[in-house]
Amino acid sequence: MPQTGDDDGPRTLQTVSTASQVMRTLKELDGAGVTELATELDISKSTAHIHLMTLVENGLVVKRDRKYELALRLFAFGEYVRSRNPLYRHGKPQVDELADKTGQYVHIVTEESGRAINLYQVKGDTSVSGEYQTSKPQQRDRLHYTASGKAILAFLPKQRVNEIIDRHGLPERTSNTVTDPDALFEELTTIHERGYAYNDEEEIEGFRAIGAPIRTPDGGVLGSLSVSGPTSVLQEERFEETLPEKVVNSANVIEVNINMSSRS
C-alpha cells in the first residue's frame, strides 16, 4: 500500500489520510457531490468516488439525493469516546449546576493535538443565544484566544506550549487576541499564579469568558471549565471578582471527584 512520511517521520497510509480528508471536507462543506469534493481536495473524480463508496460501504458516509454526508454512525463513536472521558463523567453535574447559578453558557474543555475540544456545554436561563455559542460543540478551538484554552496552556510544560505554537500559530481573531509568543507566555505566568484565565473579547467581539484548569494530583492538567457571556452581562465587577470564584470552586469539585474515583 502507498505510504507517506520520510525516513525520520511517521509512516502513514495515504489511503487512510485521504479518507480522513474526505470526511473533514464533507463536514466543512455540509455535504458535497463527487465533483465538488474532488475539486476541494485537488484529486481526481474517480479517486473521490472510490473513497466515498468505501466510506458508504463502511457506514461512515451516506448519500442523500446527489450529495454525500457524514453518517449518524459517527455520532455513536463520538458518544462512546466522550462517555469514557472522566472530565465528561464527573464534570457534567458541575457544568449543569454552574449554568443554573450563573445563567450563562458553561463549557468543559480538554486539549487534543494542540486544539481545544468542547466535551460538554449547557446554556443558562439568561444566556444569549447565537451562532457563536451553538456552534461551540462542533469546534476545535485555538487555545490561545479562549479562557478555557489559556487555563490549560498555563499548566502545560513550556516545551509543550511551544510545540502547539509552532504547529498552530497564534492567529488573530479580534484586535484583543494575543498573537505574540512572549506576551502570551507572560500572560500564562499570571494565569498560573492567579489560578484562572480571562478572555476579554479575544475570540469574538462582545463576548467574555472566565476559565479555570482541572488538574491532576501530580500537577498536570486534564482540561478546564469556563463560563462565557456577552460583555453587557459580564460587566467589570462580575467578570473580575464574582464569577472567577464560582468557576474555580466548580473546577476544584471536578478535580476532587475525578481523583477520588481513580483511587476506588
Image (cartoon, rainbow, N blue to C red):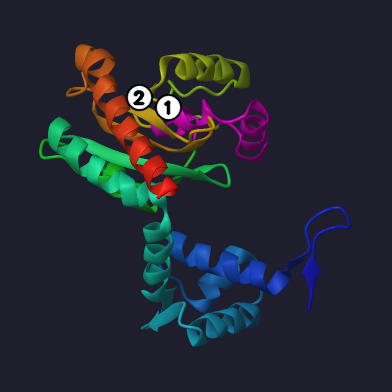
The amino acid type, in three-letter code, at marker 2 is Glu
Mark 1 Cα-neighbour bin, 10 Å: few <14, some 14–19, many ≥20: few
Picture layout, residue 178 above or below residue 49: above
Q: From the viewer's perspective, is 211 left or right of 134?
A: right
The residue sitting at 64% across, 26% down in the picture is 158
Q: Quadrant of residue 69?
A: bottom left
Q: Are marks 1 and 2 in contact (CB under 8 Å)?
A: yes
Q: Is residue 115 visible?
A: yes
Magenta stretch holds residue 204: no
Query: Where is residue 224 drawn, in percent x and y?
Result: 40, 36
Q: Looking at the image, which residue sits at the far right?
A: 7
Report the disc number at residue 174.
1
Badge 2: residue crowd in 10 Å (few <14, some 14–19, many ≥20): many
- Secondary structure under the numbered disc 1 in the rendered image: loop
Q: CA separation, marks 1 and 2?
A: 7 Å
Residue at 47 percent of width and 14 percent of height: 193
Q: Magenta segment, which residues?
A: 143-170
- Judging from the image, what secondary structure is the residue with disc 2 in? loop
**Where residue 253 sits: x, y (%)?**
30, 34
Would you say residue 128 is visible in this rendering?
no
Q: Which mark is residue 102?
A: none
Residue at 11%, 35% (x, y): give it: 126
Pick the front one: 68 or 199: 199
Choose between 51 and 146: the one closer to the eye: 146
Viewer-proximal residue, 97 or 168?
97
**Tag 2 residue:** 201
Q: How many marks?
A: 2
Magenta stretch, overall SS: helix
